[in-house]
Amino acid sequence: MANGTLTPGGRKILDAAALLFYGRGINAVGVDLIARQAGVTKKTLYDRFGSKEALVAAYLRERDQRWREWLTARVSAGGGSAYGRVLATFDGLGEWMRRENPRGCAFVNAAAELTGPAHPGRAVIEDQKRWLRGYLRELGEEAGAADPAGLADELALLHEGATVLGGLSVTENPAATARSLAVLAMERAGCT
Amino acid sequence: MANGTLTPGGRKILDAAALLFYGRGINAVGVDLIARQAGVTKKTLYDRFGSKEALVAAYLRERDQRWREWLTARVSAGGGSAYGRVLATFDGLGEWMRRENPRGCAFVNAAAELTGPAHPGRAVIEDQKRWLRGYLRELGEEAGAADPAGLADELALLHEGATVLGGLSVTENPAATARSLAVLAMERAGCT
DNA sequence: CTTGCAGTAAACCGATCTGTCTAGTTCACT
DNA sequence: AGTGAACTAGACAGATCGGTTTACTGCAAG
């Protein structure tokens, strides 16, 4: 079920599901609505994905992949120093939030709904969070942080905080706030 | 429908609802289950609260109230300086998370599920976030922050970030991490 | 030419959803 | 003694839930 091996019907279903799941919540969206919105019958949906659970997991997996590819590409494209690359993750986050995350982090939202520990979506959520922390740790290491793991914890916390505040639109520009705190964190960590 | 004016049946319903809504998600919990868990009939539930929407709002309202009272009491009881009171909010958050927030912020989780703008719970969520920011702003002011509003944005972001990470249990002690970042933010703000 | 995959159309399943209703009981207050 | 509030018990309604099934069409590859 890799991305390329998706039938046209499957593609339409996943696109419709992504929009509906993120916009209205996972439990609030039924498979009938997804199929209708995708212009596809329910049979096609079950032929392609097998269950709603699996469709949810596929939705999260694809969103995770898109975010990773987009962020790493944007950070690499900047061409700045290692120090600058860490800060670029916050600029990237801000842009992503504006464009794709009006309702906050899709994974945090999903975690709020997928309470059963057996749900296949839970593994995807954990993966997503673990990846970001690992990525930030790498960048922190390259920037010469004295304690890369500790710095990664701080940076991850800033990322999550910004995303939540952006979703609740309680603050003006949370990504910029997070970025300015990241500067302090990096200075303390001895980054250059 | 103030807290004290709640009938015994209403009390049991609200207690059961709070446990179920927070633990399993709002949309995943039906009124039948709430009534059964409360040892009460559905009629009582509808006589007391009128609708599930209203019950959800009441649940959020009460949780908000409990959090506010607990935090302010804890911060005041410390008896420290204004500077110390700001940091005490993070100690309080850490304790609260350990005791009451294993699944993250109830309001962020609720916001993920209550996507309809007309839902009465949305106003409670906004209130909750606005209150925390205002409280942090007051404390920052007392601590002599050059830009109390800006500092409040930073502190609120740290609070939310810690809560989210705590709910996903991706980091060891997110409240302590947030607290250490808060120190940096306060130093920059010129707090004494 | 045929096999098999991707798809449509639509009926069907049992369970559960929010919400309503009737009928009757307990109990405190006046 | 009488009233009204709070409650139990349980049937009922219409909609929707996730999921299955049967029958049929279009089409590309061997």
Image (tube, coloured by chain):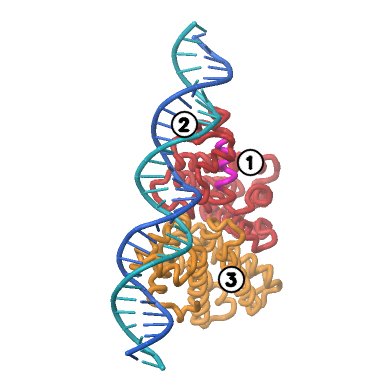
Chain colours: A red, B orange, C cyan, D blue
The residue shown at (45%, 72%) is: B48
* Same chain assignment for discs 3 and 1: no
Q: Callout 3 environment at 10 Å: few (<14), some (14 to 19), or many (20+)?
A: some
Near-viewer residue (B94 or A34)? A34
SS state under label 2: helix
Q: Amino acid at mark 3?
A: Leu
Is residue A19 part of the magenta span, yes or no?
Answer: yes
Residue B94 place in picture, x, y as percent: 47, 67
Marks 1 and 2 belong to one chain = yes
Q: Which residue is mark 3?
A: B132
Q: Chain of mark 3?
A: B
Q: Which image quadrant for residue A3?
A: top right
Q: Which amino acid, by three-letter code, is at mark 1?
A: Trp
Residue bearing mark 2: A47
Return the disc, 1 or 2, that comes first in the chain's sequence. 2
Q: Which is more toward the observer, B59 or A176?
A: B59
What residue would you read off at disc 1?
A: A70
B156 or A72: which is nearer to us? B156
Distance between mark 2 and mark 3 Cα atoms? 48 Å
Give the letter of the chain under mark 1.
A
Q: Secondary structure at mark 3?
A: helix
Q: Specify the segment rendered in magenta.
A: A13-21
Q: Nearer the viewer, mark 1 or mark 2?
A: 2
Q: Which of the 4 image quadrants contains residue B128? A: bottom right
**Callout 2: chain:** A
Q: In x, y percent, where is residue B8?
A: 38, 76
Q: Answer yes or no: is residue A28 visible.
A: yes
Amino acid marked by disc 2: Asp
Q: Marks 2 and 3: which is nearer the front?
A: 2
Total label count? 3
Q: Going 50% across and 39% down the picture, which residue do you hit?
A: A58
